[in-house]
Amino acid sequence: MVQADPNEQFAYASRYFLWQALPRFASQFHRFTIIQGKGAKTLIQLASKLGRESGRDCTIFVNDDIDKHFYKQVDKIRSQNIAIQVCNDALTIAKNTSTVQGSLYSVFTPFKNRVWQAFCTCSVFQKIEIPSPKAFFLEDFSQGFSVCAPDSLQRRFSHNRLVSIGSRTYDLEQIMPQKIDYPIPYRDEKEAQQQLSRFIHQAISQYTEQRNHLHQPATSHLSLALTWGLVSSRTIVEELRNVFNLDLQHPDHAGSPGHITYVTELLWREFYRYLLLHYPELNQQAFQKKYNLVVWEENALAHSRWLDWVKGLTGYPIVDAAMMQIAQTGWMHNRARMIVASILTKNLGVDWRWGQEYFRAMLLDLDEASNIGGWQWGASVGADPKPIRIFNPYLQAKKYDSHSQYMKTYLSSEYFKNPP
């Protein structure tokens, strides 16, 4: 089921992945129906109709979410005396995890130390009691609802590429007119599991030393799978335990540095989701309240700087290459994300929310919490004990793209002859 207007719920990159992946997912089932409507309202109508026509009570099973509106929708359904079971998903750790003083965590390292054991020993499977089986199919009860086939999503979804920045709305077709045909590494769970296996057997041992290399890094390339639920952090950790026979109950006994570093990166995703769950205002407000008083450039000059940043015309080759990477592939290396965020906010003086919204529009692997947390970290307004963190783009390029292979991949020879 999708929201009434999927073009508002999903940016273009997310829509692109959905219409590529959902038909393949649907093909695994004998019957698969998509009903379009407002979530709680449509589920209430559907459950009520199914109950009347089948003479049986209906139970709705949903995976939980960290979105601030999620449990409001669950409560609406329960208020109509309809059974709904919420299954653990968005967070592996307990939602109410707190310090010994009873407060929420605001710094990553103490959080990691507190939850490491629970995170690394959590079961992949959750036992769910299913009512006595009797087949009912949605399409048998879907008359009067807006129904669409999975392979029709590309036609039904808008192909617009809009992004709202400050008081303006930009059409990315005008800004970045090149044809978008994102290279998608996998489209289903089986292919994502194969990618996980390749990473674990071929690259994880070099992860600590080589993950920050911008050209052919030893990264997992699993962010897309984690975003869309093709694999979970729980699955990855269990696979690590099984393949390497690891004792992951404490980071000091977690095997090679690559294992420790990779699990730590998974915990950063968990940390950002934990923060967004408890502080839903982070989408628009700095975690460190004092930085809400920062006066960012918002005039024509700011928009001009933002546009140059988007188009890869800042004059910093490492930044411009990274901006071309996201424009062409819908993905950007995490080291590059940190560099471009630092330049936009610290050097160009542009509001971190402008960068956050652009990434939201462009990333195939968009994870809302990680995107918000990453941009606040890059702007030094988020959950980070270091006061101000500034990246030197030339030193970053020298260290992580020493032979300029990454920059040459995404920048033309003309760029180097006549730099912006």
Image: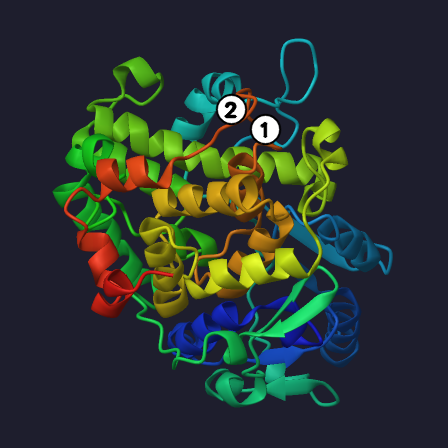
Front residue of 351 and 73: 351
Tell me, yes or no, whether the two marked residues, 1 and 2, touch with CB atoms within 8 Å. yes
In the figure, residue 81 lies in which quadrant? bottom right
Q: Residues within 10 Å of mark 1 (few under 14, many from 20)?
A: many
Q: Is residue 354 left or right of residue 194?
A: right
Q: Amino acid at mark 1?
A: Ala
Q: Is residue 288 left or right of residue 340?
A: right
* Image location (x, y in percent) of residue 389: 49, 28
| Residue at the image point whose x is 57% and y is 22% from the top | 387
Q: Which mark is residue 144?
A: none
Q: Which residue is mark 2?
A: 108
Mark with earlier residue (1, 2): 2
- Judging by the rendered image, the residue that carries numbered circle 1 is 383
Q: CA distance from mark 1 to mark 2?
A: 8 Å
* Residue displayed at 51% across by 24% down: 108
Q: Classify the position of the N terminus by image quarter.
A: bottom right
Residue 110 visible (yes or no): yes
Residue 60: quarter of image: bottom right
